[in-house]
Image (cartoon, helix red, strand yellow):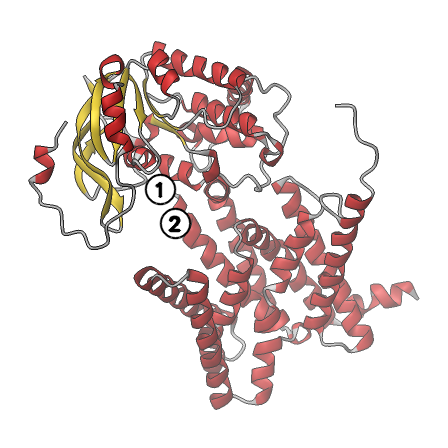
């Protein structure tokens, strides 16, 4: 059964497509990597999946999930780390589905939060302000929040960027654990070796889809070369896209 | 002697007692709002809004005198009109939002001053621009207290989404649609508290009792709850000391309160435990781990 379905999806900004005419499905429980050069539309696609960005055209189907069944790990740069909030409080926001606007954090919930923090190796950091953490520690905090969200679909935006190898190994183990639990994981990544070794399915994106399928078949030098040749800049004088153009490029 | 100087004025003179009660109400509501304004990098937006709401408050003032209900309603209308117009111009022309807001708030301030000077007297104009907390009557005090109570209740309702939106807005958008309404409610609270501060401090200084205590708190704590508490105490202390200063020296009350707050700010910049200058120069011996 498809957990995610893209029907001729175009996502973008100011009418310019950042992801152009994407078609395809992600099976429930799949472990999918999205790769492509900078500006390929990876983060844009993830924002479309979690509902932050509405498609300019086409539609994204979530297999009956509502927004609370989706956990999103944004790039750290999107977070204001100067805000005076502790690791414990930050991770506790992952309980929004249960607590909402007014729900309290009882003993059971506190234990859950502490367990999530311990699971990412941050015992003793509970009262530290997030502004005092290293990049790798902050990434662990974000993973702890995803753990707490207990979501069916997990969307990760470059989760291993600029972190050391030990942290990468620890966090990758969590991703595999989620996959083992039957959750669907959709991750934008840059490390080809990691994708080759740990992700069974890959989508190569270069504003439009270049290839999508089993990683061993998709990660070919030819496909990567096509992606590398992608034109990153928007064309301000571009004509309106013909509606049927998308069908011809469907994956 | 000390009793006569520091406590006597508030027990002997009803107007001083009312002023102190108003300052406490303004501190309880305005200081937390100021902390969020600062943390959301909107300190100057608060200042601009204080000017932007003048025409609305002025119309309310001219229709009903110093009736805070009329001034609040007028201020809310003018404040939202300016915020929306500035946003529309910024998004439709590519002009930066702060530049757009600066244009609209200046035009709005000019319009407000024009309305008051055409229809009112110079005393009215001075009253609106600089306030006079010592002239506060019981009814106005009740309105100030009511607005402060409403502010705290609404803040309690929007507190959680406001915090999450401040630190990680994308996350909030993925789990809830509360971010937009919370932001709008927060802007409304900014306007309500600015209008609330009109009577005490006037248009030009009303934002001072919100922003200065927040700035003070930033130098003493890294914890949000503690920052809010420190800001409230700092605002109340500045208000109390400003009233005493005004009573003893005949300095106008509004500027006296803000000057005391500014003095507390300077002390915090110098001696604050979080990033204070003295602490940076003499950090103490480093720890083992």
Seen in the picture, residue B119 relative to A110 is either above or below; the reply is below
Residue B284 image-quadrant placement: top right
**Residue occupying image coordinates x 37% and y 34%:** B175
Q: Are marks 1 and 2 on the same chain?
A: yes
Q: CA–CA distance between discs 1 and 2?
A: 8 Å
Seen in the picture, residue A188 relative to A11 is either above or below; the reply is above
| Residue B268 place in picture, x, y as percent | 75, 52
Which mark, residue B181? 2
Seen in the picture, residue B236 relative to A34 is either above or below; the reply is below
Quadrant where the N terminus of chain B lies? bottom right
Chain where mark 2 sits = B
**Residue occupying image coordinates x 52% and y 56%:** B42
Q: Is residue B212 left or right of residue B45?
A: right
Q: Nearer the viewer, residue A77 or B242?
A: A77
How crowded pointer 2 is (Cα within 10 Å; few <14, some 14-19, many 20+) is rated as: few
| Residue A221 place in picture, x, y as percent | 26, 21
Q: Is residue A221 left or right of residue B268?
A: left
How crowded pointer 1 is (Cα within 10 Å; few <14, some 14-19, many 20+) is rated as: few
Q: Which residue is mark 1?
A: B177
Residue B278 in sight here: yes
Mark 2: which secondary structure? helix
| Residue A106 place in picture, x, y as percent | 53, 24
Mark 1: which secondary structure? loop
**Residue occupying image coordinates x 32% and y 40%:** A52
Q: Residue furthest right?
A: B1
Count of marks overlaid on the render: 2
Quadrant where the C terminus of chain B lies? top right
Q: Are marks 1 and 2 in contact (CB under 8 Å)?
A: yes
Q: Nearer the viewer, residue A135 or B183?
A: A135
Chain where mark 1 sits = B
Which mark, residue A37? none
């Amino acid at each position: 059964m498809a957990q995610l379905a893209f029907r001729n999806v175009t996502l973008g900004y100011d009418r310019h497509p950042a992801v152009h005419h994407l078609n395809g499905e992600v099976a429930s429980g799949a472990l999918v990597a999205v790769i492509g050069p900078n500006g390929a539309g990876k983060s844009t696609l993830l924002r479309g999946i979690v509902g932050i960005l509405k498609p300019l055209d086409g539609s994204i189907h979530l297999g009956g999930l509502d927004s609370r069944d989706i956990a999103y790990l944004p790039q750290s740069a999107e977070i204001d780390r100067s805000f005076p909030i502790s690791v414990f409080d930050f991770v506790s926001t992952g309980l929004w589905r249960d607590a909402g606007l007014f729900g309290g954090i009882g003993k059971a919930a506190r234990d859950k939060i502490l367990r999530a923090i311990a699971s990412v190796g941050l015992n003793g950091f509970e009262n530290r302000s997030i502004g005092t953490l290293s990049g790798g520690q902050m990434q662990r905090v974000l993973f702890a929040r995803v753990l707490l969200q207990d979501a069916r679909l997990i969307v990760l935006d470059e989760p291993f960027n600029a972190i050391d190898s030990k942290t990468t190994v620890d966090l990758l183990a969590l991703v595999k654990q989620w996959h083992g639990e039957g959750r669907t994981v959709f991750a934008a990544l840059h490390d080809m070796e990691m994708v080759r070794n740990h992700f069974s399915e890959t989508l190569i994106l270069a504003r439009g889809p270049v290839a999508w399928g089993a990683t061993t078949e998709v990660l070919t030098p030819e496909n990567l070369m096509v992606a590398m040749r992608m034109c990153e800049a928007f064309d301000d004088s571009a004509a309106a896209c013909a509606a049927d153009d998308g069908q011809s490029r469907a994956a | 002697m000390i009793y006569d100087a520091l406590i006597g004025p508030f027990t002997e003179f009803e107007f001083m007692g009312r002023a102190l009660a108003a300052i406490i109400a303004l501190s309880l509501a305005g200081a937390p709002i100021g902390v969020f304004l600062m943390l959301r990098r909107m300190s100057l937006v608060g200042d601009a809004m204080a000017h932007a709401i003048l025409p609305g408050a002025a119309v309310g003032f001219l229709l009903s005198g110093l009736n805070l209900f009329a001034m609040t309603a007028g201020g809310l209308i003018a404040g939202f009109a300016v915020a929306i117009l500035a946003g529309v111009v910024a998004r439709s022309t590519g002009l930066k939002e702060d530049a757009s807001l600066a244009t609209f708030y200046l035009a709005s301030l000019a319009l407000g001053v024009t309305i008051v000077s055409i229809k009112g007297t110079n005393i009215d104009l001075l009253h609106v621009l600089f306030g006079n907390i010592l002239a506060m009557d019981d009814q106005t005090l009740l309105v100030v207290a009511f607005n402060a109570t409403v502010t705290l209740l609404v803040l309690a309702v929007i507190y959680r989404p406001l915090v999450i939106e401040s630190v990680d807005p994308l996350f909030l958008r993925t789990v809830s649609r509360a971010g937009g309404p919370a932001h709008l409610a927060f802007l409304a609270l900014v306007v309500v508290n600015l209008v609330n501060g009109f009577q005490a401090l006037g248009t030009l200084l009303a934002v001072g009792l919100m922003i200065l205590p927040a700035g003070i708190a930033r130098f003493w704590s890294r914890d949000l709850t503690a920052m809010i508490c420190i800001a409230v105490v700092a605002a109340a202390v500045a208000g109390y000391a400003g009233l005493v200063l005004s009573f003893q020296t005949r300095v106008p009350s509004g500027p006296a309160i803000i000057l005391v707050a500014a003095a507390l700010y300077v002390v915090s910049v110098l001696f604050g435990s979080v990033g204070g200058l003295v602490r940076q120069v003499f950090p103490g011996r480093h720890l083992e781990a």
